Image: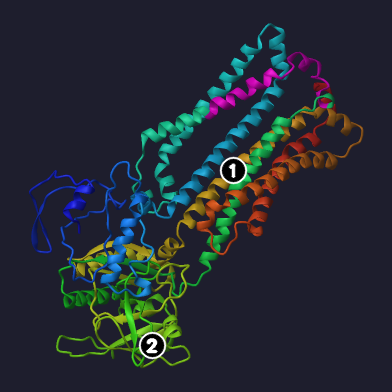
Amino acid sequence: MLSYGLWQELGGEASIVGTRLTLDDVPRTVVGVMPRGFWYPNPSVRIWLPRALDPHGQNGSYLLLGRVAPGVDIHHLEPYVKRLTAVIGQRFQYAVKADKTRDAKIVPMRDELLGSIRPAIVATFVAMGLILLIACTNVAALMLGQVEGRASELAVRAALGATRGRIAQQLTIEALLIGVGAAVIGGVFAAIGFGVLARAMPIGAWGESASFDWTMFVAALALALGAVLLIALVPALSLRRGDLRGALIGARTSGIQMRGGRLERGLVVAEVAQAMLIASGAALLVRSVTKLYALEPGIETKGIAVFDVLGSPNIRNTARGRTIDELMAALAALPGVRSVGAAMKIPLRGGGDSFDVTIDGRPDAEHTFTYFRIVSRDYFATLGIKLHAGRTFDNSDRLFTAADTNPTLSIVVNDAFVKKYFPGENPIGRITGGGFNAPQRIIGVVGNVAEAKLTDGAEPVRYYLGGQAPWWGNHVTFVVRAQRPGDATALLESTRRGVQRVAPGYAVEGTTTMERVFDSAVGPARQIMALLTLLSALALVLGAVGIYGVIAHFAARRRRDWAIRVALGLRTPVVVMHIVGQGAALVGVGVAIGAAGTVLLARLLVSFLFGVSTVDPIAFLAASLALLLIGVAAAFIPAWHTATVDPAIVLRDS
């Protein structure tokens, strides 16, 4: 529903005035078109209808939207909000849990739409920035090694008359050509894989509607080329402090006389430290998500297909209930189906609807609210919700008709309801009230289910039988248990066709499985964990390349030195351990620096962590061991090659 003033504020366009539509058997005229993608990121078909506010209505599901005048700070409106909530509090009596006047605040539209994904986006961008820095550091270290490896060649060029500027120009052009080629190839891969990357980002449904932006692509390409230019200057700057004439003199004795390499070592340490930041962050999220998946949601998730059905809001409750029964019967008859249930709302999809509750014989009981769910008879069996006392709904709980006066509803409650309202008592047979204006007899107690969020504590819930209580709204969710746990996905298409055949006036709004619902309930932590794990793997690969390149360069510089020592009797394992020890030392320093940095930056991930501290020792130990193992492995290759080369060949060639 949309008011005229809100339509104007949101930018409505009258582009197809006069078009006639028929909705719910009532002809309507289209007066305008809203901008695509407003409010909801997915391109679903949406229709707004005008509706006046009813001062006597009980519906509190409205948001107050407004446009702030240019130049006005949004927080200056807080006194007006407090005045408004004070008036609301005087006119309406709210229970504590549903008090609309508490903690009223103004939220910018951008924050309302983005919600809790802002930290995820920031953390992702930080990780991607670190990957760029690691790549730049890696390439810079390798280029420095190349310059020193080509010292004799550059010295000969200088001796033949080439100036330092000319040599620096040559090195810069070489680096730029390689860098530009890599940037272009990377840009092509980015353009091709944009959809996969957008869906991998922890931005929920916004990732599905993201479109390729050439402006941002050019900006990213310019950033990459800028990084290439800075890296290309590294070899040129190294020439300013180098001694080209001395390179020829030390060519035959470089292994003994020349040491240096401090800048390369520093770059490797920085590279490992940055990789440690990403790897430890990914390890923290892996630990957190593992704990989330270990939580018991109170339902079975394997082998259950889920699909949401949307019908016309003008269908009467009796007709809606009859159609739901027909659909469940038709779906239960499909091959491979074990049982079928229906509910207004299934677990792990938010708290949703609630009613006040009264306890018969306790007039002084606190005025509180509980969740309520309208379900079918086989709902509990289909989702595997355990029965702890009494019974669930069966054929003895008959559906009411218009002729029934003062009916008593049968309800099933959960353990949290019993713990709060009947501690130490037997609740079976007790009468409660609140909602539907009818007494409600408790017939059974089931286990607690994560009705709202996976990490929320157990909340009191009442379950009503659809048909005794009216099926509210035009949205119903069906859950279908497959005969075999692995067949849930295969049932989605057959159930969709079953709905279209039995109830052509209803639309299947979406299909999924309970496993995917559970994955979504884990939240952005799962997506950002997957992305950070991928980025940390890339960082480890880049780190391994950097360590290998620097250690190989150091080993090559001292090749003649090692050859002499081996010829004099030094054993191969000693040479290997010495060279590998250099690499391990660099990795150890980088890990220590990266661990300290992680402690400072881990607050970006606090909102995604569950049951894990930002200084979790297991996560830090896992990341450290991974980097150390990869660093040792990368250093072992050039170490073994250096230690096993025939000294006679080395001494003859040098």
The answer, for residue 244, to whether it is visible in the render is: yes
> Is 25 situated above or below 394?
above
Q: Position of residue 589 (x, y in %)?
A: 72, 43
Chief secondary structure of the magenta portion = helix
| Mark 2 neighbour density, 10 Å: few (under 14) some (14–19) many (20 or more) | many
**Label 1 vs label 2, nearer the camera:** 2
The residue type indicated by label 1 comes to Ala
Q: Is residue 38 above or below residue 164?
A: below
Question: Disc 2 marks which amino acid?
Answer: Gly
Residue indicated by mark 1: 539
For residue 153, the mark is: none
Q: Quadrant of the N terminus?
A: bottom left
Q: Is residue 500 magenta?
A: no
Please tell me the numbered disc located at residue 444.
2
Q: Magenta includes 234? A: yes
Whole-percent x, y for residue 555 in the image: 77, 32
- Which residues lie in the magenta part? 227-255
Secondary element at image label 1? helix
Could you say which is closer to the camera, residue 616 or residue 437? 437
Image coordinates of residue 124 in percent, x first then y, are 49, 47
